[in-house]
Amino acid sequence: MESQVTEKSFVQRIQQIQNEFESELNQIKSLKDLEGVRIAYAGRKGVVSSLFKQLGNIPPEERKAAGQSLNLLKQFVSQTIQSRENSLSCRNVKQKIDITLPGEPHYTGRLHPLTQVLREIKLCFQNMGFSIAQGPEVESEYYNFEALNIPKGHPARDMHDTIFVDDNLVLRTHTSPVQIRVMENQSPPVRIIAPGRCYRRDTPDASHSPFFHQVEGLCVDKNVNFADLKGVILTFARHMFGSDMKIRFRPSFFPFTEPSAEYDFSCLICRGRGCRVCKGTGWVEISGAGMVNPVVFGYVGYDPEEYTGYAFGMGIERIAMLLFEIPDIRLFFENDMRFLNQF
């Protein structure tokens, strides 16, 4: 049977071991040597573990204080070894760095081409006095169709290839519903653009996507006319594509505008002379526009005898494709870094 050990002698033994540990640690030059010290002192059969086995030989009234001193030693050994390991690891890393080698390149982030184009579009219209308006992407049929003079059964609904979320909820097919929401809550004058994501049940190809971005424009005030609309579109075209850009309007039909028109820009490739891109016409179709139909004013409580307005839309992808001469809309959504790094 082992003889009892006093707390005083046990604590003295702990201090002796700590001194021996520190002495050996100061001589360590490598991680391999450090591992040997760790095993000797902190391993399962190391010095600290053997001391824990001796606690039972200390009188019960002195055992608690002795145990606390031993735990402090265990903590000190563990933390000191970890600190020395970190120090030696950093030293090894520094020794492996060849400062004569060229540095690794750091790639900076950049804006997606659609984001670049959208920012430029916003800047252009803000400079003309338009503010930015937003609306929900999950929209009711009322705002997406009915308040825009497209009642149930209207043939124009077929053109939208709508994606239904619920019986009366759709993924908006255009940003035109934002017009209604703004006019419901704001008295004229109104001068806004509404950029945002839109959704249609289209089969993806070079010129179509079920997900796309659109900018809707609206201006309502007294004495607003079609000439104002033409001036805004021309200013936008020349801001985005250059001072020699020309525009033209062709008669068309949209339920929410009357009269309605499609507007085209002169071809960026041939500048109106005729080429394969514009199919020899010298023009590239952009989108639709027109004077706000008085019926639409009836849904928002505007007096069509006092106020007139114009509205227009454009696809951001279409503008970007023209600006950067990109032949396939799908490139915008594939996240191919070889494509994106060009912008």
Image (cartoon, rainbow, N blue to C red):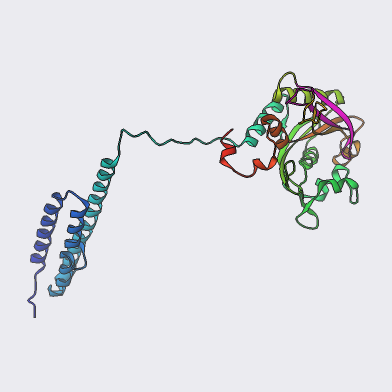
The residue lying at 70 percent from left, 40 percent from top is 329
**Left-right relation of 49 to 110:** left
The residue lying at 77 percent from left, 38 percent from top is 182
Looking at the picture, how far across and down is residue 26, in whole percent?
14, 49
Q: Relative to 55, is 192 above or below?
A: above
Looking at the picture, how far across and down is residue 337, in whole percent?
56, 40
148 or 237: nearer the viewer: 237
Classify the position of the N terminus by image quarter.
bottom left
Residue projecting furthest to the bottom: 1
Residue segment shown in magenta: 245-273
317 or 274: nearer the viewer: 274
Residue projecting furthest to the top: 243
Q: Relative to 214, is 49 above or below?
A: below
Looking at the picture, how far across and down is residue 258, in whole percent?
90, 34
Q: Is residue 225 visible?
A: no
Residue projecting furthest to the front: 276
342 or 69: nearer the viewer: 342
Q: Relative to 234, is 329 above or below?
A: below
**Residue 30 covered by magenta stretch:** no
Give the overall secondary structure of the magenta segment.
strand
The residue lying at 69 percent from left, 33 percent from top is 320
**Left-right relation of 36 to 99:** left
Looking at the picture, how far across and down is residue 229, in whole percent?
82, 26
Classify the position of the C terminus by image quarter.
top right
The image quarter in which residue 310 lies? top right
**Left-right relation of 100 to 240:** left
Query: Total marks drawn?
Result: 0
**Residue 255 covered by magenta stretch:** yes
**Left-right relation of 336 to 174:** left
Q: Relative to 205, is 226 above or below?
A: above
The image quarter in which residue 334 lies? top right
